Image (cartoon, rainbow, N blue to C red):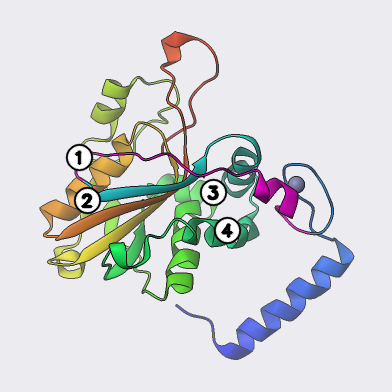
Amino acid sequence: MAAGPLALTARRVVTAALDLLYPPQCVHCTRIGSLLCERCTAQLGPGPQRAVAGLDAVRTRTVFEGPAMSAIYALKYQGVRRMAEPLGRLLAEAWPGDGWTADFFCAVPLHARRQAERGYNQSALLANQVASLIGQPYVEGAVARVRHTETQTHLDAQARRENVAGAFAADPLRVDNLSIVLVDDVLTTGATLAACAEALRASGARRVYGLVLASAVYKAADAGGHASPAEE
Ligand SMILES: [Zn+2]
């Protein structure tokens, strides 16, 4: 899968040329110079401690608000794939170092239909970035989404759990007896991460950790106010 050194160099040259023609702009404050400027990055506070059923531990880097919300929105819905680079660096800051033993990183998968619509899985881009920064392998396809689920934005916590139950399957040949870090972009109720971890454990995974960029405060749809972000 990895591109050769020549292809990488060529891509960097093209990227640098495009940056000269169209300088990157901060997706939150529109300042010219980078996709997420230093000032907006400095606004990102630490993520809260979260516990999710079936995971040995979960770390979140920040809260889903302000610049983090703009950046994730750009990565997920506006096709700004390069956003995965600064966001991957941020996510790596949440890595607990020797606290976790990991054999590899993988991403919460999208259903094939949604991935085809979007053209990529934003969490896989993040997982790839973080894995290379941490110096661990990234494994594609260790866990797959076997059932399409409805978007969860307007579901309450119980309905979200039911919506994703049994939606994932893991490959025992790739996960048996291994410690795995699951990467995702947004943590809302944790229903998706829990269902994914359950599939990994059912296929023999020894440990499952969650590394998530942003934690959202979950608001039930009937509580009024803003809709919760979609856990896909
Ligand atoms: Zn900014």
* Mark 2–mark 4 distance (CA, rounded to whole Å): 26 Å
Count neighbours of disc 1 (C-alpha within 10 A) and say few if under 14, some if 14 to 19, many if 20 or more.
some
Q: What range of the chain is rendered magenta? A: 34-54
**Most common secondary structure along the magenta stretch:** loop
Residue holding disc 1: 166
Taking the magenta stretch, the answer to whether it contains residue 86 is: no
- Label drawn at residue 84: 4
The quadrant of the rendering that contains the N terminus is bottom left
* Mark nearer the viewer, 1 or 2: 2
Residue holding disc 3: 118
Residue holding disc 2: 56
Taking the magenta stretch, the answer to whether it contains residue 44 is: yes
* Mark nearer the viewer, 1 or 3: 1
Q: Residue at x 49, y 31 (%)?
A: 229
Q: In the structure shown, which secondary structural element does the residue marked by tag 2 occupy? A: loop
Q: Relative to residue 49, is residue 86 depicted above or below?
A: below
**Given the image, on which type of amino acid does mark 2 rest?**
Asp
**Given the image, on which type of amino acid does mark 3 rest?**
Arg
* Mark 4–mark 3 distance (CA, rounded to whole Å): 15 Å
Q: Residue at x 41, y 76 (%)?
A: 135
For the residue pair 2 and 113, the one nearer the viewer reads as 2
* Mark nearer the viewer, 4 or 3: 4
* Mark nearer the viewer, 3 or 2: 2
